[in-house]
Amino acid sequence: MIYTVRLGSLSVRLARRHLLIGMGLLLALLIAGGMALQLGQFDLGAGDLWTAYRGELDKISQMILLDHRLPRVLVAIGAGAAFGVSGAIFQSMLRNPMASPDVIGFNAGASCAAVLAILVFGSARFVLPWALTGGLLTAALVLLLAWDRNGKSGIDPYRLILVGIGASLTLGATSDLLMSMTDEQRAADMAQWLTGTLNARNQADAALIWGGLAALTPVLIWLQFPLNRLIMSDDFVHGFGLRLAGLRLLITGVGVLLAALAVSVAGPLPFVAFVAGPVARRVLKTGAPVLFAAALVGALVTLGADTAARMLSVVQLPAGVFTAVIGAPVLMWLLVAQFRKGAL
Amino acid sequence: MSAEPRLAACELSVKFDRTTVLDHLSVGLPDGQVTAIVGPNACGKSTLLRSLARLQKASSGQVILDGQSIAAQNSKSIARRLAILSQSPVAPEGLTVRDLVLRGRTPHQSAWRQYSVEDAAAVAAAISATGLNGLEERVLDTLSGGQRQRAWIAMALAQDTELLLLDEPTTYLDLPHQVELLELVRKLNRETGRTIAMVLHDINLAARYCDHIVALRGGQIHSTGTPQSVITQNMMQDVFGLSCTIIADPNHGTPHIIPT
Amino acid sequence: MAADSSSVAFSGHRPHRLMWLGIGILAMLISALLSLRLGVRLIGWADIGRALFSFDPDTADHIVLWQIRLPRMVGALLCGGCLGVAGALMQALTRNPLADPGLLGVNAGAALGVVICTIALGLTDPAQFIWAALAGAAIAAALVFALGGNAPSGTGRLILAGAAVSALFYALIRGLLLVSRSSLEVYRVWVLGGFDNVTFYMVATLMPFLIVGLVLAFAAGFSLNALQLGESTAQSLGVRVGFLQLLTGAAIVLLCGTTVAMAGPIAFIGLIVPHLARVTAPTDMRWLSIYSAVYGATLMALADLIARSGMFGSNMQAGVMSAIIGGPVLIWLVRSKGVRKL
């Protein structure tokens, strides 16, 4: 069932299935967010959320809720959504379900810069601007090296993937080296950061990621249209009169910016970007790039992983461990799907 | 032919690295006719077609569309006049026939105008012209080879252009499906007056279904004209190195090759 | 027919190719001798000779040589040689010039096995954790090949599958490590990959695995020649492709798993060495393996020498250095046009 909406010159098609599942995911995210606000070492009830909203909660609860849990939950949702969209964008543009920014190395630059910042300043306090700069610089370098001057297509997907993996090989090894050059405390900070953690996030982090998402949302809505065509082969894209080189550059830029923002506030949470796209596509039963659903799936995964990390705090594990654990079955599932396709 | 054709190559050369694929070649596609480009493997047929559709950059010379160099024109405005269907296209997973055909509307669409009344009409027309009614919601992977190829043609039709280029549209089809597809192509040409050019391997089918033949050899034009004038023993010997007798097709009178 | 042509290639290749093998062996010997001589304290050539042939347990130099430098040198040569062979096998098996045990996740799998044993379970004897390393390498290899093994080359799917599996395994490793501070201390030194802790006992324990791996590699070499023409052609030439893949896979897992158990994860050697070998060696896989072994051993010994020269700080290790250099070389390989055709 597909609805057609026409308003003046605006016209779009909306599949009922996508709308319903999208709303279902949104509802699940809201419920999970509410739960995450209540759960923790300091238990809050559902009623407390309401009293806090009206400003009638006691001071300690108010502080825990508004200064600690709310920013953390907001960062988890925002970063997860940014990772999810970034992954879906790259996977569609590169026409490969495994080509997410964490796998092709766009996160390694941010990580390396963050480790350097911890080494230089002695704590994780100044990590954010460094990670953001490092991530963007790496992406610019990778793009420059992957640019194909002779072709009409600008970025050669195959080359982008391999150059990205090459960059992450070097940057990952550099991070390991930096980590070995410091004392135990800093090394532990680095290891925490490299795994991806949402510990001690504040309102400024939440504002950064949500501001970034808000600024990029119009671009993302617009991008759905060309992305839906870019999943076809280059010849069609040219034949349709789309400017492939420019589009690829723009899409990579947006994807990199989203990933860099998310890494800056949450660390390189492994596999969120990797799983969000395939899961969203499978849930919606479509091969098309589904940015909105991927954002919701990414947010759900990250929020779930972070809440699990907070709840199982016998040993303080960062959220990244849990997202990796979620990534494993998805990798297996991709594998099984591959087998089935081979059998057909 | 009196007037200049709408689409023509003029002194066109294409080089890959150091190999010359097209060598100072000039050819026009007669308006309102079905043209077949024939020639042996690696003679530059596909490259010529792709150059005419601005998918391949010229090393020297140019392609003229509507009196202007194609390289100087806006790609989207070209896409509203000229559609190309590449060789053995691959569709993304899970795409339905209607979704695929709607993709052909891209040059008429924008992010804000994704399904106008004209889009809906063009998609419906393309689907019925290719006889795909009833299959609109089927996923492409589940169709037969012939149906799938018709779906791709429908996509190119939905682009609603006067010029249509098809790169080996009959590859991987069995003979009945090849005939069915070429019947469809000719019907489209007769009913809508579209100019159609395609790369074909089977000379007999080309002679039977096309108004105009372009024979290529080694990146250059060997001969052009009606099937009767181009398909001769000499041409077959020169272009393909094949000695043959040519008889008139007992049903249609078009030239028919019998290798000796 | 294939048997004829390759046995001809095996016996009757041109002399200047053998010259390159000779140069390689010479370079290997020189770098081996240099790594005995150079270090925190310089040991003279005469002392090296005396230490080797008439060992005196009271001379400090002799002890340094036998306890530290000799096992270290042997370890570096063995690991480099095995990685070179493993890389050549992997590139032949996948018909992908960018295949490398580091890129394809085999090292990560072995690393996870080693980390579980050494750090989480506190095992220290390589005889104990080698099995975990091999199991980890085998699981990773199976995963990667299942995910991307049948992909046509040029799509990068195999490499991506390797990167994804590596990312997953390293994330799991990091997660395990964060459980305790002390394990992190061990890990952050070990992950750099190096030969600081190699002993003769370790080499002796791991040697059988390497030998079996090399024998399997050589056994597979002949049929791998036919596989270069494509699976169906190989099949029609009488090669049992499934068995061959299993044999080659076992060789790769043995060689890489053992190397990781000895020296930690070392990237890049397996990637670049077969390329050097292909330029100079006959096309026969068996010769290619021998060349790759010699070149790999030389490169590894040189990398180890440079790493501990102190030029790059005291923490530099052969493994991390080859990874840092490896990235740019990979990018260069990708950008140079020939890579897709190889």
Image: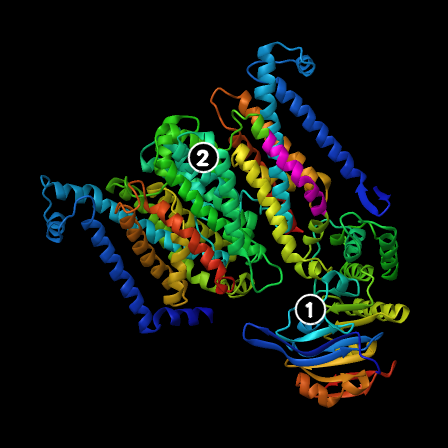
Q: Nearer the viewer, mark 1 or mark 2?
A: 1
Q: Quadrant of the N terminus of chain B?
A: bottom right
Q: Among all residues in the image, which is located at the extreme bottom?
A: B234
Q: Among all residues in the image, which is located at the extreme right?
A: B191
Q: Is residue A217 magenta?
A: yes
Magenta extent:
A207-224
Decide: is B14 above or below A41: below
Give the residue at x 50% y 36%.
Answer: A129
Q: Magenta region's main secondary structure?
A: helix
Residue A213 relative to residue B80: left or right: left
Decide: is A69 above or below C87: above
Residue A241 drawn at (x, y percent): 72, 60
Residue B149 relative to residue A143: left or right: right
Q: Which residue is mark 2?
A: C173
How far separated are the C-alphas under marks 1 and 2? 54 Å
Asked where in the image residue A27 lies, by quadrant, the reply is: top right
Asked where in the image residue C310 lies, by quadrant, the reply is: top left
Q: Which residue is mark 1?
A: B71
What is the secondary structure assignment of the residue under circle 1?
helix
Residue A322 relative to residue B127: left or right: left
Between A339 and C243, the one lying in front of the other is A339
Give the residue at x 61% y 74%.
Answer: B59
Residue B165 drawn at (x, y percent): 76, 69
What is the secondary structure assignment of the residue under circle 2?
helix
Decide: is B192 above or below A108: below
- Give the colouring mode of the picture: rainbow
Q: Is residue B71 magenta?
A: no
Asked where in the image residue A213 lies, by quadrant, the reply is: top right
Q: Are marks 1 and 2 on the same chain?
A: no
Amino acid type assigned to the residue bearing label 2 in the image: Ile
Q: Dot 2 falls on which chain?
A: C
